[in-house]
Image (cartoon, coloured by chain):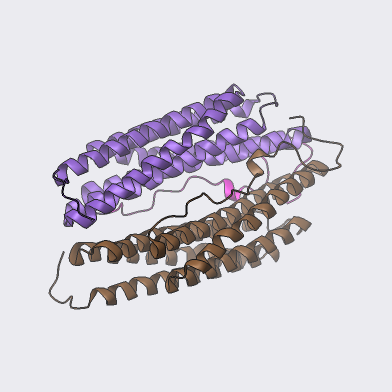
Chain colours: A brown, B purple
Amino acid sequence: MPTDHIVKSFDDDLKRLDNIIAEMGGLAEVQLANAIEGLLKRDSEKANRVIASDKQLDALEQEVDALAVQMLALRQPMANDLRVVITALRTASIIERIGDYAKNIAKRTVAISQAAPTGPTKTIGRMGKQVQSMIKNVLDAYITRDAAKAEDVRVSDTEVDDLHTSLFRELLTYMMEDPGNITACTHLLFIAKNIERMGDHATNIAENVLFLVTGSAPDEDRIKGDDSSFVVEADCDSKTKATS
Amino acid sequence: MPTDHIVKSFDDDLKRLDNIIAEMGGLAEVQLANAIEGLLKRDSEKANRVIASDKQLDALEQEVDALAVQMLALRQPMANDLRVVITALRTASIIERIGDYAKNIAKRTVAISQAAPTGPTKTIGRMGKQVQSMIKNVLDAYITRDAAKAEDVRVSDTEVDDLHTSLFRELLTYMMEDPGNITACTHLLFIAKNIERMGDHATNIAENVLFLVTGSAPDEDRIKGDDSSFVVEADCDSKTKATS
């Protein structure tokens, strides 16, 4: 609804939109970093703080939604400006989902806080670091409208997918070797999947940036490297191989 | 870009938007049904058809995107009409993601196609049926702008969450009892999670319908019933309990 006191220009609104999204990106990055640190140190207190902080991302997304809808209604932007507003809406929604994954990692960290840290946890740490830098870089690419940087993020996701697929096998092996590992490893499987999905979401933002800058989505789907859904058996020397 | 031959009314465009979304909803429902049937019958051929059909949903989402952006640019809708277009954009994106989950179930079905069907598979079948009817009902609610029906869908998601949490424990138990079950059960864990997420997405559509009809999002977050992220150990009599 138009109100009299709105006198700012469309560009001011766009800038505000970008600022909120930059803030969301920074927050999502910190949430992931803290979730991973909480996991590596089995620090339930830190994990609980991550769970509590997720509300901030939700609130910021709602701010983007409200501002974007207001801009569409009041400014009735055309062509490129319209594209910017739609992309902002999408990007905020993706960052909010990245935050949800960080929150889920934190929840699972609380569940396994009594289990001893195992080898795969460190690989998860490495995946986390990689995705954290993807989130940082793709938000930089978004704010500066940098197509080359967005493309770099898009391409780098295959490394995360590869890490995830090998981690999936590694965790299955751990579970087979000692059924006592099963509950903790199952949570680690989902944590690894969460990080892999965060990488996918960073890739989605990259594709939105490419659309924003070049006016068209990338021609080809990124070569999908996450083959964990196809894993038929654990790649291990364990005598207790899967019967499948 | 305006072209001369566009003479249809805004209402015609809205109707077309709704038609594509109804088509998407029907397709997502069928994809889920086929994915579950493929899983229950260990039918890789059916599963592969589900994987191949996902492209249709992607194409329909792009159609919604293009039409919605065109409507925003050409018609510059205000207030309620604007809300309808934004909701259509969001709904199409959610249905596309529901389709992605069906596709992932199919991929995992192929991976475990040689494993014997086990008890939990049947529970997954029940979850699938429930989510299938949620998808059907929420799309009906969307097309007929029926807030009461949307609210029913929102509330019914807690049953799916409860099924999922108990299934999670059940699958952990199977894995502990026989490490030979681990690979297949791991895929079943992710399949169950996929269905649970589809229920969440149906709930998200329901919330969008409520927003569309009432003008405001539901006051309270739905009581989140999926506690599987918090499961500390399998609820079983197995001697090989988790050490966590």
The verdict on residue B230 being magenta is yes
- Give how far across and how far down residue A124 sits, in percent: 68, 59
Left or right of B157, for residue A151:
right
Asked if one can make out residue A126 in the rendered structure from this viewpoint, the answer is: yes
Residue B78: percent from the left, percent from the top? 16, 57
The x, y position of residue B188, in whole percent, is 62, 35
Q: Indicate the quadrant where residue B104 lies.
A: top right
| Magenta region, residue range | B217-244
Query: Magenta stretch: dominant SS?
Result: loop
Q: What residue is rendered at 20% in x and 43% in y? A: B13
Q: Quadrant of the N terminus of chain B?
A: bottom left
Locate residue A233, reporting x and y percent.
75, 37
The residue positioned farthest toward the front in the image shown: B4
Residue B96 to residue A212: above or below: above
Residue in the foreground of this view, choosing between A129 and A31? A129
Q: Is residue B130 magenta?
A: no
Left or right: A233 in relation to A137: right
Which of the pair B88/A179 is nearer the observer? B88
